[in-house]
Image (cartoon, rainbow, N blue to C red):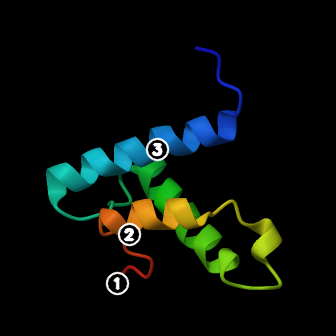
């Protein structure tokens, strides 16, 4: 079908890739060599940080639903 919001579609596509990674590896620690997914994970952390910052919340595309879904697969907001 027709995609009305390409940003939402891209997020869903990358989230599905993260779920696949999690299912295969048991964690969400994407190595840097997987450039696209690694960069997406880094953006999620930045948007999450901005989401919780009153002065920067307007810069974030993060939502409570996205946080919940990422939490459900053990996404690491502060990787080591």
Helix, strand or loop at mark 3: helix
Q: Position of residue 64 (x, y in %)?
A: 57, 67
Label 3 or label 1, whichever lies nearer to me, is 3
Q: Is residue 1 left or right of residue 77?
A: right
Q: Quadrant of the C terminus?
A: bottom left
Residue 14 - label: 3
> Which residue is labeled 1 in the image?
80
Q: Is residue 27 left or right of residue 36?
A: left
Q: Residue furthest top?
A: 1
Q: Position of residue 20 (x, y in %)?
A: 27, 45
Helix, strand or loop at mark 1: loop
Helix, strand or loop at mark 2: helix
**Foreground: 24 or 62?**
62
Earlier residue among tags 2 and 1? 2
Identity of the residue drawn at 58% across and 62% down: 43
Binning the other alpha carbons within 10 Å of mark 2 as few (below 14), some (14 to 19) or many (20 upward) gives few
Give residue 48's quadrant in the image.
Answer: bottom right
Q: Position of residue 34 (x, y in %)?
A: 37, 50
> Which residue is labeled 2 in the image?
71
The alpha-carbon separation of the residues under discs 3 and 2 comes to 15 Å
Q: Is residue 6 left or right of residue 79?
A: right
């Amino acid at each position: 079908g027709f995609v009305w919001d390409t940003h939402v579609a891209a997020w869903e596509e990358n989230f599905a890739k993260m779920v696949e990674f999690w299912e295969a590896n048991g964690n969400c620690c994407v190595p840097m060599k997987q450039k696209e997914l690694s960069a997406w994970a880094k953006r999620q952390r930045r948007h999450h940080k901005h989401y919780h910052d009153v002065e920067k919340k307007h810069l974030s595309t993060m939502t409570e639903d996205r946080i919940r879904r990422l939490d459900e697969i053990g996404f690491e907001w502060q990787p080591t």
